[in-house]
Image (cartoon, rainbow, N blue to C red):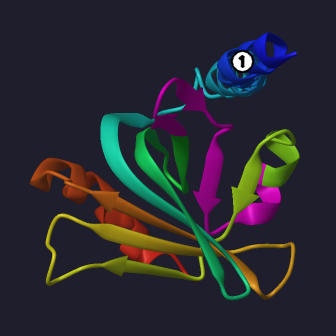
Amino acid sequence: MPTILIYWILLSPLLIVVILLIYSKIHNNKSLKATNNFLLKIKEKNYTKLRKIKLQFWETSGYRSYISPNNDCDLYLMEDSIVLVRRQVFIVTVHFRPIIITANVFDLTKEFRDLYVCRPSKIYFKEVITNEIEILIPSSIGKHYRIEITLKRLTKEQKNYLNYIKNWQL
C-alpha cells in the first residue's frame, strides 16, 4: 500500500503537466486558426506591422485584478483600428485570439465575427514614462469588468506610428 501512495505522489505532478500541455496545445490551435483567418482577411488591406512589443495585460472584474505576466504581442496598425495578437510565455507559449481595438466597432464586428472587437474608453500617452501607451477597454459583459493594456518599451518610431489614435473620437 505505501508503494502505491509513493507512485501516486511522484506521478501526479507529471500527469498534471501532461494535461496542461494537452490543454495549451488545443487552445493554441484554436487561437492560431483565428489569427490565420484574420491575416487572410487583411491581406489586401494597407497595414503596418510592429513586432515583439512588450505588453502588460490586466483583467479586472469587480475588485479583483488578474495580471498576465510575460506577454508580448504583434500590432497590426490599420487606418481605423489596431489589432493586438498576444502571446504569453511561461513554461510554454500560449497564443490568444486577436483583439481589434477601434473607434468604429460596428463595421468591424460584421467583418470579424470570431474576434473580440472593442472600443477603448480611454487611451493614455504617458508623459512621465515616455515609452508607454495605456489603453483602457470596458467590456460588453458588464460595467464591473474591464481590460487594461499597457504597451511598453516602445521606440520613438513605434510611438510615431501609434500617434494617429490620438485623433480617435472616443
Image location of residue 42, percent across then percent down: 62, 28
Residue at figure coordinates x 60%, y 30% from the top left: 95
Q: Is residue 82 above or below residue 113?
A: below
> Can you say whether 82 is above or below 168 in the image?
above
* Residue occupying the point 67% across, 88% down: 63
Of 145 and 4, nearer the camera is 4
* Left or right, 143 with reference to 129: right
Instruction: Please state, as top left, top right, bottom left or bottom right, where the C terminus lies in the image.
Output: bottom right
Task: Estimate the x, y position of residue 76 in percent, counting from the top left.
Answer: 46, 39
Range shown magenta: 86-108
Q: Residue at x 60, y 75 (%)?
A: 65
Queried whether the magenta region covers residue 43, the answer comes back as no
Occupied quadrant, residue 125: bottom left
- Of residues 10 and 143, which is closer to you in this image? 10
Q: Quadrant of residue 151?
A: bottom left
Asked if residue 106 lies in the magenta stretch, the reply is: yes
The total number of labels drawn is: 1
Give 42 or 153, whichever is nearer the viewer. 153
What is the secondary structure assignment of the residue under circle 1? helix
Specify whether residue 16 is in view.
Answer: yes
Three-letter residue code for mark 1: Ile
Q: Position of residue 47 (x, y in %)?
A: 45, 36
Q: Which residue is mark 1?
A: 6
Give the class, few, some or many, for how many residues have Cα within 10 Å of label 1's Cα (few <14, many ≥20): few
Residue 58 position by quadrant: bottom right
